[in-house]
Image (cartoon, rainbow, N blue to C red):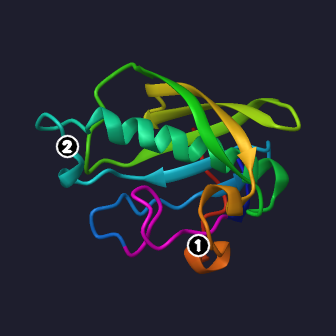
């Protein structure tokens, strides 16, 4: 599927923060079908049992893709929201140090809420985990006092990714 554009990364977010040495440091892409996708790998530091990623980090990645699917649909990073609920289904063990593919897409939207579907797959296209996430749309000022979005999310580093297969 064709990449339309790349989304910004933050400084310290556990999933996308480029200054977080313990984070996933994942890039995110706006796709031609209105979804968001990522190509990434979890690190050994993200393990629960040996060879497996901690379930909380799997769920955090699904949550990140869910909200970023709003940015992919709108092609702007100006809208935000807060997670109301998230239902994760763990299908197969998620390995660390192996390339993974993530995808999120809006399945329902109202003026105040969005519902998204997000999933993680391995490079063979096998479904590893998925979830349905509900968000309430909120202005950044309601989420955190004094938040300047372009200060918190300053990184837009092009990497030449033009297509993602899944």
- Reading the image, the residue beneath label 1 is 153
Q: Residue furthest right?
A: 111
Residue occupying the point 16% across, 38% down? 51
User: Quadrant location of residue 142?
Assistant: bottom right
Residue occupying the point 21% across, 35% down? 52
At mark 2, the secondary structure is loop
Residue 16 spot, x, y in % from top left: 47, 61
| Observer-nearest of 163 and 128 | 128
| Sequence order check, earlier mark of 2 and 1 | 2
Residue 84 spot, x, y in % from top left: 60, 32
Question: Over which residues does the magenta segment extend?
Answer: 7-19
Residue 155 in view, yes or no:
no
- Magenta residues, dominant SS class: loop
CA distance separating discs 2 and 1: 26 Å
Q: Is residue 49 left or right of residue 46?
A: left
Q: Is residue 92 above or below residue 151?
A: above
User: Can you say which quadrant of the picture contains the C terminus?
Assistant: top right
Near mark 2 (Cα within 10 A), the count class, few <14, some 14-19 or many ≥20, is: some
Q: Is residue 149 left or right of residue 137?
A: left
Q: Which mark is residue 47?
A: 2
Residue 67 spot, x, y in % from top left: 64, 46
Residue occupying the point 75% across, 44% down? 137
Residue 130 spot, x, y in % from top left: 50, 26
């Amino acid at each position: 599927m064709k990449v339309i554009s790349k989304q910004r990364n933050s400084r310290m977010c556990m999933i996308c923060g480029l200054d977080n040495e313990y984070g996933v440091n994942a890039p995110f892409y706006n796709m031609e079908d209105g979804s968001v996708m990522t190509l990434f790998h979890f690190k050994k530091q993200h393990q629960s049992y040996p060879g497996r990623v901690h379930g909380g980090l799997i769920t955090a990645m699904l949550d990140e893709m869910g909200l970023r699917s709003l940015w992919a649909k709108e092609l702007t990073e100006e809208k935000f929201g807060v997670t109301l609920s998230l239902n994760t289904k763990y299908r197969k063990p998620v390995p660390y140090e192996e390339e993974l593919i993530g995808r999120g897409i809006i399945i329902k939207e109202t003026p105040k809420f969005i519902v998204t579907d997000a999933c993680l797959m391995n490079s063979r296209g096998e479904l590893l985990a998925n979830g349905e996430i509900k968000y309430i749309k909120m202005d950044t000022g309601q989420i955190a006092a004094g938040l300047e979005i372009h200060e918190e999310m300053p990184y837009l580093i092009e990497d030449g990714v033009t297509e993602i297969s899944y």
